[in-house]
Amino acid sequence: MLINKKIIFAITGSISAYKSIDTIRRLKEQGAIIDVILTSSAKMFISPMTIQSACDVKVYTDMYDPPMSHIKLTQKTDLLVVAPATANTIGKFASAIADDLLSCIFLCHDKKTIMAPAMNNKMYENSRVQRNIENLKASGVLFVGPDTGPLACGSEGKGRMSDSEDIIEMIKTTLSKQDLKGHKVLITAGPTREYIDPIRFISNRSSGKTGYALAKTALRRAAEVILISGPVCLKNPYGIKPIFVETSAEMCESVLRFSKDATIIIMSAAVSDFAPIKKEPSKIEKRDKLTLSLSKTTDILKELSKLNNKSLKVGFAAQTGFEIKKARQKLIEKGLDIIVLNDVTEQGCGFDVDTNRVALLSNNEEDDKELPFMSKEEMCEHLFDYIIERYNQKYRDEQ
């Protein structure tokens, strides 16, 4: 989604300036076109040559070299990002001071601006700095962070510049279409665990990557997001606090509780189909043979269908083979509106990877869509486009 997006990335005078190299490189890897502004104070921490060499970008430092650069740079720009943003720069922007290249660019720039503050915690908490931040927010400037933790000066508190991942997520949110505004989207992610004894359990290989990517995408597109997650080793999506569960029973209870006013429900979690009939209270000692008695877990999708709410329901069919007929049968049996089919045995698809190849199936075969091999993030964008089309069609037909 960042392909050919033109971003002015400004670096100001903070010890956090070196972190911006990683952010710029990641943005470029995802297709963004970057021009870098380096203030005179920033050059005390990082040189133009370092940025040019590490990131292969054009670096601007002087308003008069080339002449009118503060105007020319903003003419076809999609976004201005200031990371790190010092208290001095925040104050200049809030006061419309235009005494260097960056402050002039801010006044010429008519698109969105994102600032990532970085400073000592006492400076950040100062009432004048807070007033400047609130004034900028009121004028439409967006802020990401700062985070709380150890600071370069030896203090500890709120003032650390946000991680590259969070800054990039804010950039993607700002540049995304807002077509899910007004929607409440419930998403399940990850595996469940069904305990045999306090140590051992039955589970599966689901990493939760697809569900977390779906949650990020929905939030970027302005939805209210509820993420119900099994045990995963992933960072919480920026701006989302997941509801963590462990067993299929806990997953079912949470889904039924939070689904009542959801407009879109996406069941991407890999919920266990079977659970031990009895959980042993203590560790089962090692033995030559062990027989487990299993019972079928509650079918969450079938329980959802009993609620008769007007949500659009999306399920996943992770199969060992790209079998559209089986996936369509599941769509019908579970009362789904859409099912996402993928072959977990295909190289680069399925579990523990960042890519996938899927087919999107609906109740109308003419609307079925096979997507080529792509990143899970890209796949989620296509899936939400498909969901919006089906949602609008479904409720237009019911009127």
Image (cartoon, grey):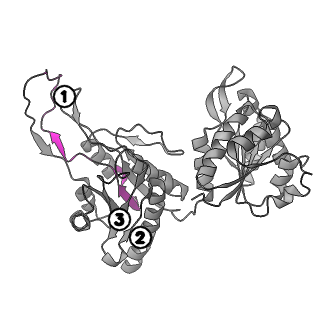
Q: CA distance from mark 1 to mark 2?
A: 44 Å
Question: Left or right of 76: which side holds 272?
Answer: left
Badge 2: how crowded within 10 Å, few (<14), some, or many (20+)? Answer: some
Q: Quadrant of residue 40?
A: top right
Bin the neighbour count of mark 3 within 10 Å (Cα to Cα): few under 14, some 14-19, many 20 and up: many
Q: Residue at x 21, y 53 (%)?
A: 299
Residue stretch in magenta: 257-286
**Which amino acid, mark 3?**
Ala
**Dot 3: element:** strand
Q: Which mark is residue 125?
A: none
Amino acid on which the number 1 mark rests in the picture: Asp
> Which percent across, then down, holds residue 326?
21, 64
Question: Which label sits in the foreground, 3 or 1?
Answer: 3
Is the residue 291 above or below the residue 31 in the image?
above
How many other residues sit within 10 Å of disc 1, few (<14), some (14-19) or many (≥20)?
some
Of 76 and 249, nearer the camera is: 76
Of pointers 3 and 1, the one earlier in the residue sequence: 1
Q: Main secondary structure of the magenta part?
A: loop
Tell me residue 9's x, y (percent).
Answer: 73, 48
For the C terminus, the image quarter is bottom left
